[in-house]
Every structure is written in C-alpha cells, then in structure tokens.
Amino acid sequence: MKSVMIFLCLIAIAVMSYGQDSINIVRNQKWREDISYLKLRFPAYDKSISPFLFFNTYSKTLEAFTVKDVTEHFYELADSIYNKVNEMGDEQIMLALSRLIALSPNAHSRLYLFRVRTVLNNIPVGIYWFGEELRIVSCPKDQPGILGARILEINGEPIKSMKRKISALIPGNASWKCYMSTYFLRSPQVLKGLGLTSDGRRMQLKVMTIKNAILSTTLEASFISQTKTQEAWKDLSPIKINHDSLQHLLKENDKLPFYLQHPDRSFAYSILKKEGILLLQINRNEAGSELLSFNQFMVPIITIAKQQQVKKIVLDLRFNTGGDFSTTVGSITNLCKAIAGKKAYIIVSKATFSAGIMSAALFKKLTHAKVVGEAPGDELVFLSEGGNLLLPNSRLNVHYANGLQNWQFSESFTLSPDIYVPFSFNAYLNEMDMALESIIKDR
C-alpha cells in the first residue's frame, strides 16, 4: 500500500508538472505572438524611430525630425525579448516592451502601463518630485509618520538609481520622464519587473521624515483598473482625495494656493485686484467637470482682460498635459488680441505637455509673454495624433504617433523659462506659489 501511495503521488506530481509545462508553453507562445505583432506594426505606423524630413514653414528649410535612426536597434531588442520570453516573468516582459517603445525620442509614442490606462498595481501613496527630492504628499491614515517624508530608497535601491532605471522605460525628454516616473515608482510589480523583488504586492520604503528621522515602512499595493487619464499632479492637492483612507500633507482651507484649488476642473480663473493680475489656469484643453465649453468660459474673461485695472495676464499651464487644442485655439487667440500691450506670462512645468505645449507656444508668439517655472514636458517639434495598437493576447495598448506638430516659430523661439522657478518643497509645504510670486515681483 505504501508503494502504491508513493506511485500515485509521483503520478500526481508528474501530471501537475506536465500541466504547468503546458501552461508555460501556451503563455510563452502568446507573448511571442504579441512581440511579433508589435515588431511588424509599430515601425510601420509610428514615425519617430527613424529620421524623416519635413519642410519647416518658419525657417523655410528641410529638417529632420530625429537625428538618430533607432530602427535597427528596435528590431534587435524586439528579437532579444522574443528569444528570452521563456526566461522572463510577465512583469519583466511588460517592462522590456516599455523599454523597447522608449527607444523612440517622442513622448506620444508609448506603451500604456499607467496614467491613460492602468495595467500594473500601485501602493496607496501620493508622491511628487520637488527638484531631486521625491516626497510623499498623501498616505494611509495608519502611516502618519511618512507624510511629507523624502523617499531615500525603494526596496534597498537608492532613489537616484531607481529614477535612472525608470527613465529607460519612458520615452520623451527629461522633464516628461521625471513626471511619468511617479507612476512607476509606486508599483511593486515594476520592482518585480526590474528584478528588485520577487513579491509584486509589497514595497519597502526607506524615508527621511520631516523631522529628519530615518525610518522604513512596508506598504501593500492594490490594483484599480483605470481607462481614463489619471494625472499624478492631482496628488498635490488635498481636494478630491479619498479622505476615508488617506491623509494629505496640506489642508483644505483658504490658504491653499489657487493652482491647487481646482484639480477637478479643466479651467479656472482668479483676479488679484491688488496686484492687477488676471490669472487663467488651463489644466486641460477640453471640458472636464465644467458645464461650460472653453469658448463659453472665456467670454467674460476676455472682457475682464480688457479692463484698465488689469495690468498682467498669467496663463497657468503648469499642469496642462494636453487635450483637444482645436477647442481652445480660437479663444486663446482672441484673448491675446484683447490684451495687446499688457504684460503677459506663462507658467510651465514638467507636466506641461502636448496641447499644453501648443497653448504655451501660441500665447507666447502672440503676446511675447515671459515663460516662468521649469522646463516643460516636451519640445516644440513633436509627433502626436496617431492611434493605438492592441496586442492580440495581452491586450496591452501601444500608442503610435504620426502627426507632426511644429510650434517652433523661429530658430530662437523657445519655452525655456525666462524666469526659472524650481518647484520647491518648502514653498509647497508653506502653501506658497513661488512662480506666481515671481510674476508679481517682475517689473
């Protein structure tokens, strides 16, 4: 009887092993089909991985959109991933595909893992970059000690090294990579894909608290499927967070700076009567929770802008990540005409992107506005539009870009800040808007 039991156990183990082998074979084959699909179609649809010439209507010359041909490298890396599928976990493959798409210099060409579509998990904290400091601005109520803390290490990896590794997964310029990194740096599954843990559910943080104490904590992640754009900058505001489970570094009160008062709105405005400033904030080039369209919203604002007591007009685009520029171009143009001769300013940051870039460029062109803040999240010449490739098995979405946008009106035209104002944690903590303060002081 004992020998029979041993035999049956061996058979059961063999069946289980064979079953798992079959599952692995099917899984590997499906990933290879997805990689082959991507390798064939992405270079054919996307225009950013090989140089192409376009006629610059401003300089009247032929120019190359990219200076580096990465097509061959793209094929080589795709083949490498294909050949190593059986050695890689799902998270490793997804990050490898993200790294593959990030060979493109164009930030609109991307694999959706976060922000527009959420595929991987996140720990329940809000984080944001203040210069080289990654700070916790919201966290679970049972972790009060880490609120406002500076993250030093993630799973034992120094934050500077983590940022560098994440940067390789994100296409675009340094500013956009920095903004997008906040999504990746909260995901234990990303850590698993990077080989920094075998547990894709928990993340260990080593932090320096506001009181300069060093402590470590472990947070468990959850997965919430999102198919609408989730903006990391909204974590900066205490408004609209889930107060039942999270606590925020800032309080909802009348001291909260205007730029943080309306995270749920696409556009808002304020009048600083004492300073003679009209402040117009556009967080997105399309209606959000507003009942009015942008054109309807702008009718009274254009009237206000013409008033003699309004000396300065500030277009705050620091959190404008895009939208439909065609819905706003007419009213922005009309505003520029209405404020002829008045001082104009644009606030930009690393989250200024896509239609936000276009709005900033048009406003500066028509008003000669000063740019205030940090370097924006893209260049003046970029590819957008395009569409999505849906990988047949994993159902991952890869966005390709094929529509040229050229907003560099002359060789010297730039959105680099005329008044550089870094995003300071101390100013944020003390509820101060240093970009706006610098505009108030500018003569």
Image (cartoon, rainbow, N blue to C red):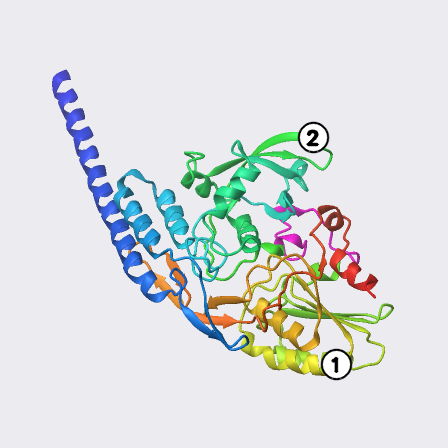
> Distance from label 1 to label 2 (Cα)?
53 Å
Q: Is residue 15 above or below residue 124?
A: above
> Depth-wise, is mark 1 or mark 2 nearer the camera?
1
Residue 160 appears in the picture as rendered: yes
Is 182 positioned to the left or the right of 19 in the image?
Answer: right
Mark 1 element type: loop
Residue 106 is covered by the magenta coloring: no
Residue 292 appears in the picture as rendered: no
Query: Quadrant of the image for the C terminus?
Result: bottom right
Q: Residue at x 61, y 71 (%)?
A: 361
Q: Residue at x 41, y 51 (%)?
A: 98
Kind of residue at disc 2: Ala
Tell me which secondary structure the magenta stretch mostly adopts: loop
Q: Residue at x 55, y 66 (%)?
A: 380
Residue 340's mark?
1
Is 16 positioned to the left or the right of 286 in the image?
Answer: left
Give the mark nearer the N terminus: 1 vs 2. Answer: 2
Is 210 positioned to the left or the right of 116 in the image?
Answer: right
Q: Residue furthest front?
A: 61
Q: Position of residue 390 (x, y in %)?
A: 34, 61
Kind of residue at disc 1: Ala
Instruction: Categorize mark 2 by other alpha carbons within 10 Å: few (<14), some (14-19), many (20+).
Output: few
Q: Which residue is mark 2?
A: 213
> Is there CB contact under 8 Å for labels 1 and 2?
no
Q: Residue furthest top?
A: 2
Mark 2 element type: loop
Which residues lie in the magenta part?
235-255
Which residue is at the front of the view, 33 or 371?
A: 371
Which residue is at the front of the view, 192 or 407?
A: 407
Tell me which corner region of the image, top left, top right, bottom left or bottom right, holds residue 293. bottom right
